[in-house]
Structure formats: C-alpha cells, structure tokens
Image (cartoon, rainbow, N blue to C red):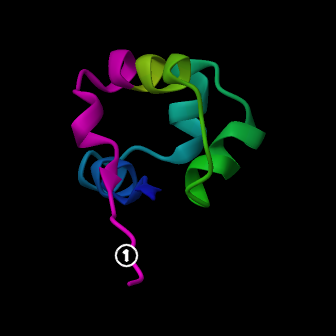
Amino acid sequence: MISYKPLQKLLIDRDIKKQELMKRTGISSATMAKLNTNEYVSLEVIDKICAALNCQPGELLEYIGEEVKK
C-alpha cells in the first residue's frame, strides 16, 4: 500500500496549507482528497507536487507492505 503521510508531514514542516498546495500545483480538491485517503493518484500529480515543493517523490510517499498470509 502507498501512504502519503510523508507529504502531510512535509506540508506541516514547511507551513504550507493544502489550499496553497492546490493553488501552486493546479490539482483539484478531489485529487487532494485522494492524497488524504491514500488512494491512487497519477505520476503527473506527483510530478506537479515535486515541482511545486522542490522535492523528490520519496519525500511524498512511502510503501507500507502488507503482511503476507501463509
């Protein structure tokens, strides 16, 4: 599973509101909602956020492995 918790932390650390990020990137409120609930967003969205925040994708998301059932 992909988690966008690092993005949330980055916004807090840089004192950037979600509305401000939406203005800087042009992403919609629906896309922001997807980020808040760890749903799929396109690489285009990740690219826009990286450009706006001058960061790498690894600073926005993390992979959380699911326990493998045996």
Quadrant of the image occupied by residue 22: top right
Quadrant of the image occupied by residue 1: bottom left
Q: Residue 35, how many percent across, how many down? A: 57, 48
49 left or right, relative to 57:
right
Residue 22 vs 47, above or below: the answer is: below
Residue in the picture at 22% in, 27% down: 56
- Between residues 28 and 43, which one lies in front from this camera angle? 43
Q: Residue 65, how many percent across, how many down? A: 33, 65
Q: Circle 1 is placed at which residue position?
A: 68
Part of the protein shown in magenta: 50-70
- Between residues 21 and 34, which one lies in front from this camera angle? 34
Q: Which three-letter amino acid code belongs to the residue tagged 1?
A: Val
Residue in the picture at 51% in, 33% down: 21
Q: Please say whether residue 58 is one of the residues in the magenta stretch.
A: yes
Label 1 sits on a secondary structure element that is loop
Residue 68 vs 65, above or below: the answer is: below
